[in-house]
Image: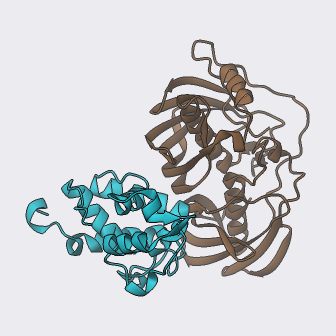
Chain colours: A brown, B cyan
Amino acid sequence: MFHFVDQILELDPGHHSLGVKHVTTGDAFVRATGGGGSVLLSCIIGEALGQLGAWNVMAANDFAMRPVAGVVGRVAITGEAKVGDTVLLDTTIDSVTDDAVFYHAAASVDGETVLKLEDTLGPMLPIEQFNDPDELRNRFARIFTPDAPAELPLSGGEAVSPFDASFDEVLSFEPGKEASVVRTLSGDETFLADHFPRKPVLPLSLLLESLLQLGQNLLDDGDTLYVPRGARKVKMNRFVEPGSSLVAKVHVVGRDRENALLRFLCEIDGARVCVGQAEYSAKPGERP
Amino acid sequence: MSKEENLNTDTIYPKVREIIADVLAFDESEIERDGSLVDDYSAESIDFLDLVYQLEREFKIKIPRGMIEEEARRGVSDGEFEEHGRLTDKGLERLREYLSEVPEDRFTPKMPVNLIPTLFTPETFCKIVVRQMEGVEPVASD
């Protein structure tokens, strides 16, 4: 499953929507924390916010066009959503044109913001290329239940393999400086079934999560732990389809005792696929 | 800035250059006013969407999609402007006149219409911004 809006609570077409995402056991997109618990991958919270925005604009245009990932001006990671938490998703559409939607969004848990998206742009493309519009209409009807009480979190579902954020091959790795790695999309990845049924492509959210984790490993000096604080100017130039080998190059631009900044560039056969910057905060003495 | 007195491409260029550099991930010093956004700075369709949005937001204007080509075509029929997806001589002349800021040698006879965006320069967007801020329709001259 690669649908992350469990319920839409409010929807003002073309303007604003509120929704929820329950973080449940058995979710493929959680990671273990040092304390023995599990939290939802930060980039999946961002994905959920983007999907809420997509539901809004798709409903507004009667499922003729859908947005896909394009540009995220800023992702700010300010907290975590643990298993058992309910994440409130709040997406505001700044403008919609024939070819793009622009929005910003925030996710919170118990009133505390855990992630924000700013200056986000999604190109609008014909929905028929990606999904069966009727299937989306039906799903929308199931989750757009503003008058119903919030659904209880699902738990104990079928066991799913956790998402593997690692890369397949390391071309170079110089700690504290740069890394160059490869990931090939095999086509068997479970998330491709939903993203998208008619055009399986690597979600930007999962690519970004992989890059943030790669950057964290690159910054690891055995002493200070650098944790992802967010990303800036992330841009997806083209789709990553099954069979494609993505080469990701990450290099450390700056680093001090409190912060680190990395730049990344992903290419397929020399063509730019994704660029951006990753930001980290230092947590001296803390180890995973 | 006084809109009436100081609004011209020179006064807005620094901000337009800053936005272009930011969108295309170049240093401002690397941006040439007559550089080709596509050929020199690798701009792609997503970059143009981003650029137009950033300009709209910064200058509080609306830039209709496809505006450049639409205005270049004004006053000539589709058949006069292009033939089998390529510019006619008249189409090329119109485009050269409309995109007067673009160096002459970048216009090639019978160039494919879908390559028109390769001509766009930072100055092209300065002109669009000024035109939209002034709210003045360009004068079509045959």
Measured along the vertical axis of the image, is residue A45 above or below residue A277? above
Expressed as whole percent of the image width and height from the top left, the position of residue B44 reads 55, 67
Image side of residue B85 versus residue A169, left or right:
left
> Which sits in the foreground, A191 or A109?
A191
Q: Residue furthest front?
A: B79
Q: Relative to A101, is B65 above or below?
A: below
Judge whether residue A233 can be spotted in this image: no
Please indicate whether residue A208 sits to the left or right of residue A16 in the image: right
Whether residue A266 can be seen here: yes
Q: Nearer the viewer, residue B124 or B80?
A: B80
Is A243 or A234 nearer to us in this picture?
A: A243
Q: Residue furthest bottom?
A: B105
User: What residue lies at 54% left-to-right and 54% top-to-bottom?
Assistant: A75
Q: Position of residue A24 (x, y in %)?
A: 76, 33
Q: Is residue A153 above or below residue A94?
A: above
Which part of the image, by quadrant, shows the N terminus of chain B?
Answer: bottom left
The residue at 63%/14% (across/down) is: A149
Q: Position of residue B10 (x, y in %)?
A: 22, 75
Quarter where residue A83 is shown:
top right
Counting every numbered tag in the picture gives: 0
Q: Would you identify the image quadrant in which residue A245 lies?
A: bottom right
Residue at left offset 83%, top offset 60%: A185
Is A183 displayed left or right of A44 in the figure?
A: right
Q: Please say if A40 is above or below A220.
A: above
Quarter that holds the C terminus of chain B: bottom left
Q: Position of residue A232 (x, y in %)?
A: 52, 62
* Residue B6 in which image quadrant: bottom left
